[in-house]
Image: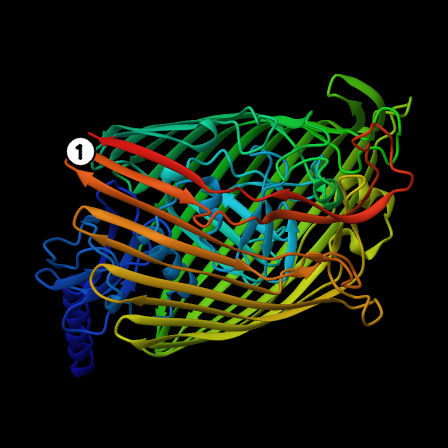
Amino acid sequence: MKKTLLFTIFLLLGVSYSSLAQALKGRILDQTSSPVIGAYVIHNGSEHHAHTNGSGYFVLQGVSIGDSIQVSHMGYETQNLKVEALDREFTIRMRETAIELGEVVFSQDLNPLNTLSRIDLRTNPVNTSQDILRKVPGLFIGQHAGGGKAEQIFLRGFDIDHGTDINITVDGMPVNMVSHAHGQGYSDLHFLIPETVERVDFDKGPYNADKGNFATAGYVNFQTKRGLDKSSVSVQGGSFNTVRTVGLFNLINEKKNNAYIAAEYLASDGPFEASQNFNRINLMGRYGLSLDDGSDISLIASYFTSKWDASGQIPIRAVESGQISRFGALDDTEGGYTSRTNLGLTHAKQINDRLFIKNNVYYSNYDFELFSNFTFFLEDSVNGDQIRQRENRAIFGAESQLTYSKLFSGGEYDLQFGVGLRNDDIRDNELAGTKNRDSVRFVTQRGDITESNYYTYLNLNVSFDKLRINPGVRVDYFNYLYQDELTPAYDPKSLNAAVVSPKLNFIYTASDNVQLFLKSGIGFHSNDTRLVLERPNNESILPRAFGADLGGSFKLMPRLILNSALWVLRLEQEFVYVGDAGIVEPSGRTSRRGVDLGLRWQANNWIYLDGDFTYSYARSIDDAEGENFIPLAPRITTTGGLSFEKDRLSGALRARYLQDRPANEDNSVIAEGYTILDLNANYRVNAFTFGFFIENLLNSEWREAQFDTESRIRLANGQLEPEPVSEIHFTPGTPFNFRGFVKFTF
């Protein structure tokens, strides 16, 4: 009888406690209904706390009606709220405030690099597509065929070309193009309107199980704004007959519905003697809907088209002899056309206290045509060596991600499971020889490619008091299919391949001001379908990258943050640029190691200083000492600047430095480095904002892209050079460039 009574009492107490202390579920948004990711939610008077996930959701355990909670996030006003109900989802809207580095507190759920990017994005807003990529510390870019071609990317001792070793996505939609007509991983980000970017999520190295192909040197994911609180129209104009107009139009901004459209038009002649005739049109629309069952739906549609002429890469000897100027051309019929249409649908739902699901589906239709001349008259002394690369592509993909969270004695864990697919259907992928764009001399390659990637990953985060352990594994399966259109019979070639990529990361939060990490993992980049099918027994079908990072983040003073890392990365296969064909080809194994340092200092309430330094040592493993340099691999890079925001006035002075680096394997040819300063400022008067941008403030002469290429040119007297010459070919960096703008907000 006593045992029954005691059991009944304990049961009633348990029922009573469960009715009083329950889980508080909610979502934290900003004033535009965009999710606030990584917000800190704490139960006042206890140790219970939670962080918002990628969709702004949180679950806080041990909460009762009448309790108070505190919600905080850097760059937003801290809120203290009273819990009035537990039977419905709690929605909190936060207001932006000035950046205060003193508010930064390191936690196990915090990615220090992403914290730096949020600071940089707030204090130095993006204004061009190039600005977007430069938000990644240590990442450099170079443009070398007119403003419409994807940028050349440099990061962690890599000449990544146009994206071979960095995974780039926008709202979960891939930017990298597999088996592209111009190069593997080609990433044209120009369809993204910079003003629509809400957040830049990135990490360096192959340490994230949810990031697959090309995520060797790192990944970058751009997230666009969920909604707008106001509309705006801006007009820019300046040097080289440059005109840019941008419109952001708020259609709906309600608690459960958000919609806006954005448009961009850009035209410029460029600094070249032969007009670039560049123009680009961008259109984008986004609609978001929150349902009563806790589901969140987002639909994104965009269209992009661009045309341009280019002066191409020119040899040093032609400039030094006076035959052409730095902004002249030996073949001014280069250029191209590209377009892309995107559709994306995302669904997210907090199913219960422990289970969260996110689904993503996307479709892209893409056209590309590029005319280049790298060697002039080396191969054809009569018609020249101009080539055309083109393709038409359709991309379809889907991913479903399920996250299960649970508390246990001494900590908590999140188990994340994902499964997805991507299919590229590429028609008329072609390399041909042309003359003046209008006549085809020969066709080297033309065919249809179908490449499918099926994948799954498992990611576990186990958090104790100060330590977070993150093991993960990813499995990718590829199917390659190619039909050569130059062969008379229908005889498609096909091949299957798979790769397993394990990860293991440790994050130790010693205090609110010190966080240490050790990351390790294996990643990969796929090879071009045509190359894979030529070497079906080669181990380099899916070459792997083995990496490790050791570092930490340190709050040295209330407003001074230091981020550092020692890293090493080895690849089973490297890519080398072949200038006379305009393609890349595989070579042997490579090894890289280096140091990353980042500093952020808030001098006072309105002045911010930042700096990033990287050192990289890159060598080929299989080549002899002295002949094992990796062409164009950056060694030392530095970026930094001073930005300010006081009352109605804001602006920044920015600098970037790229050291001299080897342009060939024995370091006998050097690609010259450069230092460039940029300046911007704006002043707000009621609904109007007036400002300017200055690129290359000191009007430095610099070479934006450089290659050691063998070529043969026609001299000023009309005669061909007697022999080919191998030397640096370059595109000149932009000279002093001023653009003024006015923006109207309504």
Q: Nearer the viewer, residue 651 or 246?
A: 651
Q: Nearer the viewer, residue 690 or 561?
A: 690
Q: Secondary structure at mark 1?
A: loop
Q: Please name the residue shown 60% across and 54% down the image.
A: 154
Residue 351 is situated, as x and y percent measured from the top left of the image, at 34, 49
Q: Is residue 241 left or right of residue 466?
A: right
> Which image quadrant for residue 420?
top right
Q: Is residue 2 left or right of residue 556?
A: left
Residue 3 is situated, as x and y percent measured from the top left of the image, at 20, 81
Figure quadrant of the N terminus = bottom left
Residue 493 is situated, as x and y percent measured from the top left of the image, at 84, 36
Q: Nearer the viewer, residue 406 or 450?
A: 450
Residue 639 is situated, as x and y percent measured from the top left of the image, at 46, 60
Figure quadrant of the C terminus = top left
Residue 726 appears in view:
yes
> Which image quadrant for residue 107?
bottom left
> Which image quadrant for residue 224?
top left
**Category of crowding for the residue at label 1, using alpha-carbon neighbours closer than 10 angstroms: few (below 14), some (14–19), many (at least 20):** few
Residue 225 appears in view:
no
Task: Name the colouring of the figure.
Answer: rainbow
| Count of numbered tags | 1
Q: Please name the residue shown 35% across and 78% down the image.
A: 465
Please say if 371 is above or below 115.
above
- Where does label 1 land, which residue? 687
Please say if 82 is above or below 726.
below
**Amino acid under label 1?**
Ala
